[in-house]
Image: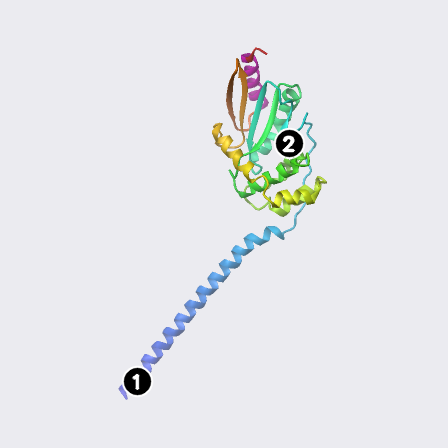
């Protein structure tokens, strides 16, 4: 009788262990499934969430626009901006200092101003936004797309600049969307964006926005790095000093 009872107890223990293992397995499978669904949601949601309202920025007058440059290419001073479309300080520069810089120095033929991305400095959305701007530039709308992207910032790496949203921005500029999509989906400017970062770092750029001011004195090219969204007074000081050094 004792042997029978011991056998029954062992059987019960084995059954309890089997059930416990089954519960653990089901919990593990459930956890993995939930995690997989969540990860899939993160990738899929940006393509289906509502686009929402698109802010239209005030038009900015830029002289002699050619792709990502504005002004006279023969101007005595060249300013290369290294920026990130997700950077709030970069957006602030566009709304404040850049407008004054264009009015007072670019339009006057003293400065040639060129915009560059800074690779994936903040994240992958930075690259996508730069791609969209450069692709719009193929249709002579680089600066319009530049202003539109900055006007619709909502944060860094929050999914705002999805391919779908950037395409919606492009549509508001009345671009040839077949041409735009071919460029954008084909990563036509992937190499240029990577080179932007290489060139920026070679010029001492570590963060956005940063500006490399270059000019030539007696055949020697000189450069000065200006970091941050500085005021027009800061740029005026550097520009006037460079002009004086050149004897202009």
Judged left or right of residue 247, residue 31 is left
Highlighted magenta segment, given as a residue range: 231-245
Sequence-first tag of 2 and 1? 1
Taking the spot 30% from the left edge, 85% from the top edge, the residue there is: 5
- The residue positioned farthest toward the bottom in the image shown: 1
Count how many numbered circles sit on residues in the image: 2
Circle number at residue 67: 2
Q: Residues within 10 Å of mark 2 (few under 14, many from 20)?
A: some
- Residue 137 position by quadrant: top right
Q: Is residue 243 magenta?
A: yes
Mark 1: few/some/many CA within 10 Å (<14, 14-19, 20+):
few
* Quarter in which the N terminus is drawn: bottom left
Q: Is residue 216 magenta?
A: no
Q: Position of residue 51 (x, y in %)?
A: 66, 48
Tell me if residue 15 comes above or below residue 158 in the rendering: below
Q: For the view shown, which residue lies furthest in the right direction? A: 174
Q: Main secondary structure of the magenta part?
A: helix
**Disc 1 marks which residue?**
5
SS at mark 2 in the image: loop
Q: Quadrant of residue 11?
A: bottom left
Where in the figure is residue 228, as x and y percent of width and height? 53, 28
- Image-based side of 211 in relation to 61, left or right: left
Provide residue 20's location: percent of width, then percent of height.
39, 71
Determine the secondary structure under disc 1. helix
Furthest residue in direction top, as rendered: 247
Q: Say if 226 sits above or below 163 in the image.
A: above
List x then y, in percent, for residue 61: 69, 27
Q: Residue at x 54, y 43 (%)?
A: 124
Which marked residue is nearer to the observer: mark 2 or mark 1?
Answer: 2
| Residue at mark 2 to residue at mark 1: CA–CA distance | 89 Å
Q: Are marks 2 and 1 in contact (CB under 8 Å)?
A: no
In this orientation, which residue lies closer to the viewer: 182 or 168? 182
């Amino acid at each position: 009788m004792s042997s029978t009872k011991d056998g029954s107890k062992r059987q019960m223990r084995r059954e309890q262990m089997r059930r416990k293992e089954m519960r653990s397995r089901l919990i593990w499978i459930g956890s993995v499934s939930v995690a997989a669904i969540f990860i899939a949601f993160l990738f899929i949601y940006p393509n289906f969430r509502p686009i929402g309202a698109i802010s239209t920025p005030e038009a900015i007058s830029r002289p002699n626009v050619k792709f990502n440059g504005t002004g006279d290419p023969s101007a005595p001073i060249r300013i290369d901006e290294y920026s990130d479309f997700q950077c709030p300080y970069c957006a602030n520069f566009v709304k404040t200092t850049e407008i004054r810089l264009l009015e007072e120095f670019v339009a006057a033929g003293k400065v040639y101003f060129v915009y560059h991305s800074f690779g994936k400095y903040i994240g992958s959305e930075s690259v996508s936004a730069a791609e969209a701007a450069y692709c719009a530039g193929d249709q002579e709308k680089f600066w319009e797309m530049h202003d539109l992207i900055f006007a619709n910032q909502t944060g860094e790496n929050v999914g705002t600049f999805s391919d779908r949203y950037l395409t919606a921005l492009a549509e508001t500029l009345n671009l040839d969307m077949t041409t735009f999509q071919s460029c954008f989906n084909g990563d036509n400017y992937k190499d240029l964006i990577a080179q932007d970062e290489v060139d920026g770092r070679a010029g001492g750029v570590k963060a956005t926005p940063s500006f490399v001011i270059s000019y030539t004195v007696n055949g020697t090219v000189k450069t000065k790095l200006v970091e941050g969204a500085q005021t027009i007074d800061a740029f005026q000081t550097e520009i006037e000093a460079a002009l004086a050094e050149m004897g202009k």
